[in-house]
């Protein structure tokens, strides 16, 4: 019961701060306050504005914001989000572009389940949707999933990926971003043994901890220092009575956010102070860089406790993927059984979350795959976010990934053939 109380206490603190922000903004914006010639009044209104917005975003799932899109044909097309497969802990969604021929590249973008929603990959989707059929794993907030839906650990996550790949068929190209990279590799190996005809054509792993010990970071050091008992005691709580998942054990999003913020506290503090000053000067807007970034960054989701704990224990501490000892539903997965799926790894030279060396370790595990089907790329000067959503992704990495997909699709590049050819 105390874990429910602490969960609801965090939500109460969040709600109170949101209310304080709204109150300060409303009070300082009252017309009579304009008669007080004191800049502190304007500062109070700005502080209230940014405080209300920040704490409100912490419990709201961001929108994809892809109402329409200009494609390679130069025309604007509406984008519809279609739920292809619906499961309790996550759906497979398709960004269906109206009025456009089906594109020959079919891409499954595996989003992280590491505290943020799949919308974190919004810019990645935007960059691919112009000439690809894009599917994304849209993971659900654990606080909204009833206890009756059962558990969800890394084995369940892997089996979800297996089902999604089987549904999309063997002409799919999979791109896994960050946290899901090791489990996506395991899912592909599982298919290679159980149902080889359902394997994707290619697999691109971006900034994922295949072998966390290959290049230690603050994240891996934390995983080694803390025992599983300490982690469970400090991080795990039960969803309070306000949400549908009442009683479910979770790693709360608000607790995750406090960890994220503390890693770069000085930088975040400066960003918010600068934004308050911009509001006071009338230089801020609803969709400026600060709001676009923090509206996404502050939107966090609860993770199922068993998923979080099994990730730390089996991926980081025991290194089951790195040692090729991972077991799914009683079946020992052998990554060496992947013999036909082309695999490419992408890393950023300045990635402080999954440092260079952690992801490329996957290639050494692929003992049954010819070297001609292996590739790797290290983007100089790129951090963790940049390798899948920043300028480095748009200008350098995306073209390399699409070229890798074309080389391993069994067809000529899309620009050289009718758009509806080779449709699954």
Image: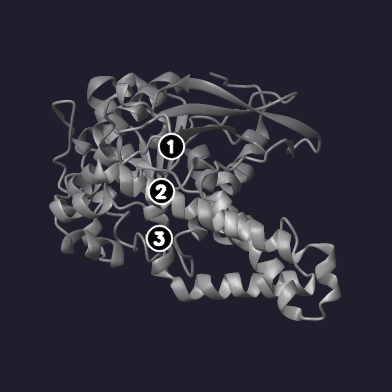
> In percent of the image, x 43 and y 19: which residue is there?
167
Pointer 2 with pointer 1, Cβ within 8 A: yes
Horizontal relation, residue 411 to residue 65: left or right: left
Q: Nearer the viewer, residue 89 or 350?
A: 89
Q: Position of residue 113 (x, y in %)?
A: 39, 43
Look at the picture and state if 119 lies above or below 270.
above
Q: Give the mark nearest the N terminus, 1 or 3.
A: 1
For label 3, the residue is 258
For label 1, the residue is 141
> In percent of the image, x 36 and y 30: which residue is there?
161
Look at the picture and state if 360 lies above or below 269.
above
Q: Position of residue 126 (x, y in %)?
A: 63, 43
Horizontal relation, residue 182 to residue 120: left or right: left
Which of the 4 image quarters holds residue 246? top left
Which of the 4 image quarters holds residue 101? top right
- State whether residue 276 appears in this view: yes
Horizontal relation, residue 37 to residue 292: left or right: right
Q: CA distance from mark 2 to mark 1?
A: 9 Å
Q: Give the mark nearest the N terminus, 2 or 3.
A: 2
Q: Residues within 10 Å of mark 3 (few under 14, many from 20)?
A: few
Q: Position of residue 263 (x, y in %)?
A: 39, 68
Q: Does dot 2 land on a helix, a strand or a loop?
A: helix
Q: CA distance from mark 2 to mark 3?
A: 9 Å
Pointer 1 with pointer 3, Cβ within 8 A: no
Pointer 2 with pointer 3, Cβ within 8 A: no
Q: Give the mark nearest the N terminus, 2 or 1.
A: 1
Q: Does dot 3 land on a helix, a strand or a loop?
A: helix
Q: Which mark is residue 253?
A: 2
Q: CA distance from mark 1 to mark 3?
A: 18 Å
> In percent of the image, x 75 and y 80: which residue is there?
39
Q: Does dot 1 land on a helix, a strand or a loop?
A: loop
């Amino acid at each position: 019961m105390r874990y429910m109380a602490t969960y609801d206490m965090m939500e109460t603190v969040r709600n109170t701060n949101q209310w304080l922000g709204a109150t300060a903004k409303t009070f300082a914006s009252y017309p009579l306050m304009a008669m007080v010639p004191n800049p502190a009044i304007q500062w109070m209104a700005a502080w209230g504005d940014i405080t209300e917005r920040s704490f409100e975003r912490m419990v709201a799932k961001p929108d994809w914001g892809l109402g329409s899109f200009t494609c390679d044909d130069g025309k604007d097309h509406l984008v519809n989000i279609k739920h292809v497969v619906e499961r309790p802990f996550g759906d497979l969604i398709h960004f269906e572009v109206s009025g456009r021929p089906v594109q020959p590249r079919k891409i499954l973008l595996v989003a992280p389940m590491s505290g943020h929603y799949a919308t974190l990959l919004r810019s990645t989707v935007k960059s691919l949707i112009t000439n690809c059929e894009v599917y994304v794993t849209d993971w659900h907030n654990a606080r909204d999933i009833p206890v009756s839906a059962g558990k969800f650990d890394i084995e369940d996550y892997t089996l979800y990926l297996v089902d999604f790949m089987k549904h999309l068929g063997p002409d799919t190209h999979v791109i896994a971003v960050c946290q899901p990279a090791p489990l996506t590799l395991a899912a592909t190996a599982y298919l290679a043994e159980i149902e080889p005809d359902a394997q994707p054509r290619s697999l691109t792993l971006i900034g994922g901890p295949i072998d966390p010990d290959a290049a230690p970071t603050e994240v891996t050091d934390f995983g080694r220092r803390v025992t599983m008992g300490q982690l469970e005691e400090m991080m795990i709580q039960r969803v309070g009575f306000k949400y549908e998942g009442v009683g479910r054990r979770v790693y709360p999003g608000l607790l995750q956010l406090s960890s994220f913020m503390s890693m770069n506290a000085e930088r975040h503090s400066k960003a918010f102070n600068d934004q308050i000053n911009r509001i006071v000067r009338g230089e801020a807007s609803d969709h400026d860089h600060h709001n676009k970034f923090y509206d996404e960054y502050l939107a966090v989701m609860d993770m199922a406790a068993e998923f979080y704990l099994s990730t730390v224990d089996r991926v980081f501490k025991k290194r089951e993927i790195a040692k090729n000892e991972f077991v799914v539903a009683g079946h020992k997965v052998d990554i060496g059984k992947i013999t036909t799926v082309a695999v490419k790894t992408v890393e950023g030279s300045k990635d402080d979350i999954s440092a260079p060396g952690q992801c490329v370790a996957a290639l050494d595990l692929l003992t049954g795959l010819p070297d001609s089907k292996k590739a790797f790329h290290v983007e100089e000067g790129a951090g963790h976010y940049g390798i899948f959503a920043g300028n480095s992704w748009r200008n350098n990495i995306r073209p390399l990934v699409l070229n890798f997909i074309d080389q391993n699709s069994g067809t000529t590049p899309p620009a050289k053939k009718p758009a509806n050819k080779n449709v699954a």
